[in-house]
Image (tube, coloured by chain):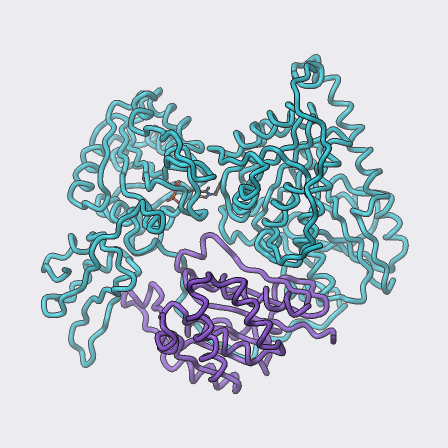
């Protein structure tokens, strides 16, 4: 037996491998991305990126209907996109086991909201498992496939940032063998969800939930750990670890299956302890169901509905309940310090574009990706950001309520991966209904934000094989956009001219940028330019270059009241020349 | 083995190689026979933002993150980030910090200045502080990119793990062609 220190994501990938999974599909999204990247290391599994989560889940469903085990992985907001097939999949059930991994991001380390995916399990009426460390990530993934086939249901596995990106020790097992061979089987009453068939399936789904709850009452997936009977805590996932850390003496009912809940087991536990608590991140999901059972419990009175928990926050909660002393205040008070938010890289091809949008006084309906950082000062060039794809449709909607001179200012900005994810439909709408807005597609040839994943326009697959590149220009034209042009975003004059012209046009138009992401250096797809330097003689200290917010350019104040000067860090500069074009004094060479 | 858990925090700026350093630590503790947990944030923060990685080892570790105020060792890759993280430490914590500054955006724009004498301020709170000129020593070892390994060497002297185990982990985690230089860098860090 061998052991390894694995992240939760690596362990889920290992679990999928050991479970005999044949097909894996996903769309990247922090903190879920590395699950598929790790599954892709096992040649036995057909692994691929889908353009969005709905497609990823539907690919997995197809594989399951063919009789193979399949997994789809996504971040929490991806489940919103995949919800359409998910709710009906609950009715059809599966042929080969199917697992959907949803990785939540409490605290919104890299997300636009902190929705609690557990609600999806209840809403779509399917079981959800929640591992508490990497070992359980692997074990629960394996188990999820067994349960999926045993109960004829898709199974959701819920992770969160601290589980997916936490590492702990895992024992590695072998890949199962002897699973049934995939084959086509006609089974219309189960797989064709028309009203007549679905009406027959629904009661089966309700019965399935009861059966799963019964399973949860007696299965080792839910564990009652009796220690002192003074305090009993019900918890799941990473929160279990915090509770054990803070209240080592308390009894704990650790739920591995967070939906459906094991009613009898919960009543039994409640009867054994003097005070009952539920500690959970985000929504009172477990708490409300326990209250509905008529069991008295303390929960959100002491724990916030917002943000992630931590040992300190759990300690503060139990301090409110009088069980422990409050955390001590830190030794050092550092006072206010300059923050260090994320920033676009030096040489990022998005920078010149946002600079220009700012100068043109554009009103930018934005989208999600590295380019969302165009919102930060000093660029300050993004005005809305809702969800993937929304930039284009928001632009289309906003112009409908504006007078013509304001309409012209509206520019929707979207990345290549985001455009392919859900922007295409939006652009189709814009063309169809002739909304007079401008859309910029920032084609940096990669899905950068989540760590450089390939996409259908990048020319490569997940496994690095060359692939057909979606022709964005032809696609936009085919959708009905008559004015499509391609620009080099590092050429400031051309960028400004193109944007000004298209913004002035009272018709839908698309501008596509053509510079690769500068993180593609290693892959040889980005070629850095010559490193630039500031001529300290010629620099007048006008600060024009600082308006780019490039991490390679630093303001150096001069001593004794003289004017400061700009300085370019040669180790950081990628030679994009955008600052050079801005310098009126030819001081950047 | 006692029940004591040792808590290490690695802090710096996205892109400095903090994740790899924390992987080496975790690997070492596993090889030494301990239970290990580790946690950090990927994604958004990696674009030049503040990064904190937590590594914990002992007989049985529960939380993957270090309880606030219980850090035993601070492994700082950058001065401002090390200073920012002091509230995570115990009063008697040991600090190893790289003598290196990366100006944050407000400083680049000339709207704020990089705080002065951070090393001295860290030392005022934490007597057991070692300031390391990682870049210089790494150059001495043969490659400026081995600065993290110099720091790792210094950190290794503050942990109850045999040198052979560290060497085993380095060999496993560092690419072959960089191993010799990293061994030198590690030794320079241990000699501080
Ligand atoms: C529904 C949904 N899925 C996934 C994500 C995670 N995510 C954020 S941005 C992004 C892709 C960005 O790629 P692109 O549009 O090419 O912009 P870039 O980062 O390359 O500038 C992804 C996958 C999300 N926020 N929402």
Q: Is residue A559 left or right of residue B138?
A: left
Task: State which quarter of the image contains the N terminus of chain B.
Answer: bottom right
Residue B177 placement (x, y as % from top left): 42, 63
Look at 63% across and 47% down and name the residue there: A159
Q: Tell me if residue A576 comes above or below residue A91 in the rendering.
A: below
Q: Quadrant of residue B158?
A: bottom right
Ligand 1 location (quadrant): top left
Residue A555 in the image: state x and y as whole percent: 24, 67
Considering depth in this image, is B166 or B35 the residue closer to the camera? B166
Chain (purple): B
Between A370 and A357, which is closer to the camera in this rendering?
A: A370
Position above or below: A574 against A487: below
Q: Is residue A311 visible?
A: yes
Which quadrant holds residue A504?
top left
* Horizontal and vertical percent position of residue A325: 71, 73
Above or below, A314 against A347 in this view is below
Asked whether the viewer can see residue B81, the reply is: no
Report x, y in % for residue B39: 58, 60
What residue is drawn where x is 78% and y is 57%? A233
Considering depth in this image, is B55 or A175 the residue closer to the camera? A175
Chain A representation colour: cyan
Judged left or right of residue A549, residue A283 is right
Between residues B114 and A436, which one lies in front from this camera angle? B114
Q: Please state the total of marks drawn on the protein image.
A: 0
């Amino acid at each position: 037996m061998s052991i390894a220190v694995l992240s939760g994501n690596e362990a889920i990938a290992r679990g999928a491998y050991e479970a005999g999974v044949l097909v894996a599909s996903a769309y990247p999204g922090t903190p879920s991305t590395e699950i598929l990247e790790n599954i892709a290391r096992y040649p036995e599994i057909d692994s691929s990126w889908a353009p969005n989560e709905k497609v990823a889940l539907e690919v997995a469903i197809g594989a399951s209907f063919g009789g193979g085990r399949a997994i789809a992985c996504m971040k929490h907001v991806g489940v919103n996109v995949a919800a359409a097939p998910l709710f009906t999949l609950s009715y059809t059930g599966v042929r080969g086991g199917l697992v959907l991994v949803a990785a939540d991001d409490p605290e919104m380390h890299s997300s636009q909201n902190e929705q609690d995916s557990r609600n999806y399990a209840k809403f779509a009426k399917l079981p959800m498992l929640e591992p508490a460390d990497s070992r359980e990530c692997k074990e629960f993934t394996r188990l999820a496939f067994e349960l999926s086939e045993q109960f004829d249901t898709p199974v959701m596995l819920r992770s969160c940032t601290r589980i997916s990106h936490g590492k702990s020790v895992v024992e590695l097992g072998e890949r199962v063998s002897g699973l049934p061979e995939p084959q086509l089987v006609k089974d219309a009453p189960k797989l064709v969800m028309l009203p007549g068939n679905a009406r027959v399936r629904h009661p089966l789904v309700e019965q399935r939930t009861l059966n799963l709850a019964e399973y949860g009452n007696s299965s080792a997936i839910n564990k009652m750990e009796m220690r002192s009977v003074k305090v009993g805590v019900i918890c799941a996932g990473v929160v279990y670890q915090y509770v054990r850390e803070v209240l080592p003496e308390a009894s704990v009912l650790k739920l591995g299956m967070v939906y459906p809940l094991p009613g009898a087991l919960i009543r039994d536990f409640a009867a054994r302890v003097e005070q009952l608590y539920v500690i959970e991140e985000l929504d009172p999901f477990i708490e409300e169901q326990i209250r509905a059972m008529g069991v008295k419990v303390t929960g959100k009175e002491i724990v916030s509905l917002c943000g992630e928990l931590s040992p300190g926050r759990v300690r503060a909660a139990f301090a409110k309940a009088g069980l422990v002393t409050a955390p001590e205040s830190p030794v050092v008070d550092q006072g206010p310090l300059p923050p260090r938010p994320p920033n676009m890289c030096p040489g990022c091809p998005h920078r010149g574009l946002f600079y220009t949008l700012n100068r043109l006084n554009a009103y930018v309906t934005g989208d999600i990706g590295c380019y969302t950082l165009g919102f930060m000062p000093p660029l300050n060039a993004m005005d809305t950001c809702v969800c993937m794809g929304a930039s284009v449709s928001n632009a289309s909607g906003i112009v409908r309520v504006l007078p013509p001179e304001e309409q012209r200012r509206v520019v929707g900005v979207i990345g290549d991966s985001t455009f392919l994810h859900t922007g295409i439909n939006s652009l189709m709408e814009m063309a169809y209904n002739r909304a007079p807005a401008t859309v910029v597609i920032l084609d940096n040839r990669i899905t950068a934000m989540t760590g450089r994943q390939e996409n259908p326009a990048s020319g490569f697959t997940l496994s690095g094989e060359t692939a057909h590149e979606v022709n964005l220009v032809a696609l936009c034209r085919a959708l009905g956009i008559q004015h499509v042009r391609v620009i080099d975003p590092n050429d400031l004059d051309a960028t400004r001219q193109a944007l000004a012209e298209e913004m002035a046009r009272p018709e839908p138009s698309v501008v596509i940028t053509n510079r690769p992401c500068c993180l593609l250096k290693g892959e040889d797809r980005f070629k850095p330019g010559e490193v630039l330097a500031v001529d300290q003689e010629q620099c007048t200290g006008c600060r024009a270059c600082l308006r780019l917010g490039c991490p390679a350019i630093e303001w150096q104040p001069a001593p004794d009241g003289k004017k400061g000067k700009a300085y370019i860090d040669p180790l950081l500069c990628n030679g994009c020349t955008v600052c050079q074009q801005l310098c009126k004094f030819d001081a950047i060479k | 083995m006692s029940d004591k858990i040792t808590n290490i925090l690695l802090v710096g700026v996205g892109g400095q190689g903090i994740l790899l350093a924390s992987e080496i630590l975790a690997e070492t503790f596993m090889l030494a026979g301990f239970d290990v947990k580790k946690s950090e944030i990927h994604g958004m923060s990696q674009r030049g933002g503040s990064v904190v990685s937590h590594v914990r080892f002992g007989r049985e570790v529960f939380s993957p993150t270090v309880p606030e105020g219980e850090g035993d060792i601070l492994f700082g890759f950058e001065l401002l980030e090390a200073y920012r993280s002091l509230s995570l430490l115990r009063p008697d914590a040991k600090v190893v910090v790289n003598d290196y500054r990366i100006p944050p955006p407000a400083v680049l724009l000339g709207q704020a200045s990089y705080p002065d004498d951070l090393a001295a301020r860290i030392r005022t709170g934490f007597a057991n502080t070692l300031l390391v000129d990682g870049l210089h020593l790494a150059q001495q070892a043969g490659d400026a990119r081995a600065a993290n390994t110099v720091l790792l060497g210094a950190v290794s002297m503050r942990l109850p793990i045999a040198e052979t185990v560290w060497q085993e982990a380095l060999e496993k985690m560092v690419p072959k062609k960089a191993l010799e230089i990293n061994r030198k860098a590690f030794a320079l860090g241990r000699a501080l």
